Image (cartoon, helix red, strand yellow):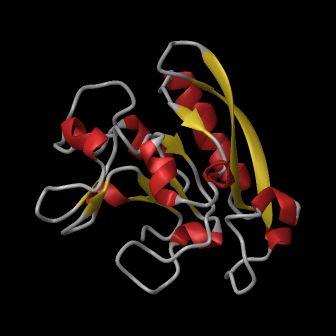
Amino acid sequence: MTRDQVRYSWRPGCPVQVSDLRMITMTHWGFDDKVHTGRLVVNKDVADDLVSVFKRLYGYRFPIRKMEPIDAYKGSDFDSIEANNTSAFNCRAATGSTSWSEHAYGRAIDINPRENPYVYADGSNAHRNADAYVKRPLDKPGVINPGDRVVRAFESIGWGWGGYWSGAKDLQHFSKSGR
């Protein structure tokens, strides 16, 4: 990775150095039932594990709307979510916190954020384009449900799913720490 590749998502003071990040390029199924190529920026210590999970998701033909580094959205988590973009590294605070997000370490990923929204404890979400996807279980393409094969694929590498959190649930979010 070079500093130019993470121009908007990395800044001095981030808890990970640019030299500890890797760009992984992967093929994935799209919602159009065609094969696409996507890219994720992740911490080098989780790159191989994530490639193995995405190989499984590819074998399941699990659709992913798009997969671009957050820098395509100038580091804006909100804009990336609005575009239904699957992304990983972004040096930012956790939602509703001043502590670093697991994304700031490159050890978290958000998958199909429209189909798998962040749901507040009261059942609302910040993205109106996701209103139809709040309740689980839900049988629609690209949706992640409790205990499904997507969750199990991430559990196989020791990652936790935000859909199991108490209170607010982050249905798009997987991380090495489970936070």
Residue 132 seen in this snapshot: yes
Number of marks: 0
4 is higher (above) or lower (below) than 141: below
Q: In the rendered view, does 15 fall on the left or right side of 157? A: right
34 is higher (above) or lower (below) than 116: above
The residue sitting at the top extreme is 33
**Which residue appears at 59% of the width and 55% of the height?**
88
Looking at the rendering, in which quadrant would you find the C terminus?
Answer: bottom left
State the image coordinates of residue 143 (x, y, percent, origin top left): 34, 34
Q: Give the quarter of the image for residue 163.
A: bottom left
Looking at the rendering, in which quadrant would you find the N terminus?
Answer: bottom right
107 is higher (above) or lower (below) than 115: below
Residue 159 seen in this snapshot: no
State the image coordinates of residue 86 (x, y, percent, origin top left): 53, 44
State the image coordinates of residue 96 (x, y, percent, origin top left): 34, 77
**Which residue appears at 44% of the width and 40% of the height?**
112
Q: In the rendered view, does 146 fall on the left or right side of 104? A: left
Closer-to-camera residue (30/152): 30
110 is higher (above) or lower (below) than 112: below
The residue sitting at the left extreme is 122
**Which residue appears at 64% of the width and 65% of the height?**
106
State the image coordinates of residue 136 (x, y, percent, origin top left): 18, 42
**Which residue appears at 43% of the width and 45% of the height?**
82
Closer-to-camera residue (177/127): 127
